[in-house]
């Protein structure tokens, strides 16, 4: 089972985004038969099989084994991933494609779409994928944002120069600054 399955086909999203199928998918976090899932969800095995079949067709669930029960072959199914990401490209961009202003939300959204697509494309079969994640909080006054961006670019350029050689594993570095959501909602309630 993968950690993440990136859904970039409309058929996959259509198969997934039905409440009953999400319930079935949750039950298939562990390998189970349709009969077992039906008992857990208080549904008929036929109804569960219908949903499992659609999920299998969309590549969201795998048949992992089969067993014989009272002379009948019964499939054992498991979810294909622990979580599912819907590609922003399923809907597509409305309006202009790229924002050139590095201080804009549009530019940040374009960057996040690229990061999401890159992470989804990683080889999930590798036992351990080397990655680095860093997050923190800073406070920058509006008038200081251009200077902060210039300092950040210079710091990153120094890192690129120092570690930009041809040896070693290649990593993509993306840095994002955005308003902290809880801070924004607190400002809205104070007004």
Image: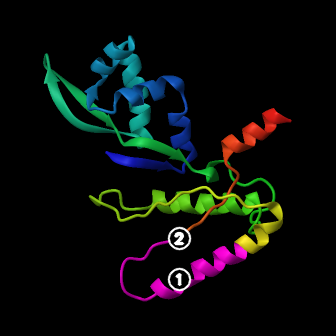
Q: Is residue 66 left or right of residue 13?
A: left
> Label for residue 173?
2
Q: Secondary structure at mark 2?
A: loop
- Mark 2 neighbour class, 10 Å CA radius: few under 14, some 14 to 19, many 20 or more: few
Which quarter of the picture shows residue 142? bottom right
Which quarter of the picture shows residue 132? bottom left
In this view of the protein, which residue sits in the foreground, 14 or 168? 168
In this view of the protein, which residue sits in the foreground, 129 or 68? 129
Residue 86, image x, y percentages: 55, 46
Which quarter of the picture shows residue 62? top left
- In the rendered image, the residue lying farthest to the right is 191
Q: Quadrant of the N terminus?
A: top left
Q: In the figure, 47 relative to 169: above or below?
A: above
In this view of the protein, which residue sits in the foreground, 99 or 94? 99
Marks 1 and 2 sit apart, C-alpha to C-alpha, by: 9 Å
Labels 1 and 2 touching (C-beta < 8 A): yes
Q: Is residue 77 left or right of residue 119?
A: left
Q: Quadrant of the C terminus?
A: top right
Residue 78, image x, y percentages: 31, 35
Q: Secondary structure of the magenta portion, mostly?
A: helix
In this view of the protein, which residue sits in the foreground, 18 or 102? 102
**Residue drawn at x 36%, y 61% as measured from the top left:** 123
Q: In the figure, 165 relative to 73: above or below?
A: below
Q: Earlier in the sequence, mark 1 or mark 2?
A: 1
**Residue drawn at x 44%, y 33% as measured from the top left:** 54
Which residue in the structure is indicated by mark 1? Answer: 160
Q: Residue 160: say if magenta.
A: yes
Q: In the figure, 109 relative to 10: above or below?
A: below
Q: Which residues are magenta?
A: 149-173
Q: Is residue 122 left or right of residue 144?
A: left
Q: Secondary structure at mark 1?
A: helix
């Amino acid at each position: 089972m993968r950690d993440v399955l990136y859904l970039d086909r409309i058929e996959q999203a259509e198969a997934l985004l039905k409440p009953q199928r999400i319930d079935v998918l949750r039950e298939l976090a562990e390998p189970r038969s349709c009969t077992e899932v039906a008992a857990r969800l208080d549904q008929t095995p036929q109804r569960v099989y219908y949903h499992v079949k659609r999920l299998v067709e969309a590549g969201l669930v795998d048949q992992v084994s089969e067993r014989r029960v009272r002379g009948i072959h019964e499939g054992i199914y498991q979810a294909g991933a622990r979580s599912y990401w819907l590609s922003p490209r399923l809907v597509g961009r409305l309006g202009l494609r790229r924002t050139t202003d590095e201080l804009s939300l549009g530019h940040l959204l374009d960057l996040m779409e690229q990061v999401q697509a890159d992470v989804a494309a990683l080889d999930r079969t590798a036992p351990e994928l080397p990655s680095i994640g860093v997050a923190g909080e800073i406070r920058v006054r509006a008038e200081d944002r251009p200077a902060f961006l210039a300092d950040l670019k210079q710091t990153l350029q120094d890192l690129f120069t120092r570690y930009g050689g041809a040896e070693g594993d290649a990593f993509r570095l993306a840095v994002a600054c955005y308003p902290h959501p809880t801070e924004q909602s607190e400002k809205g309630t104070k007004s």
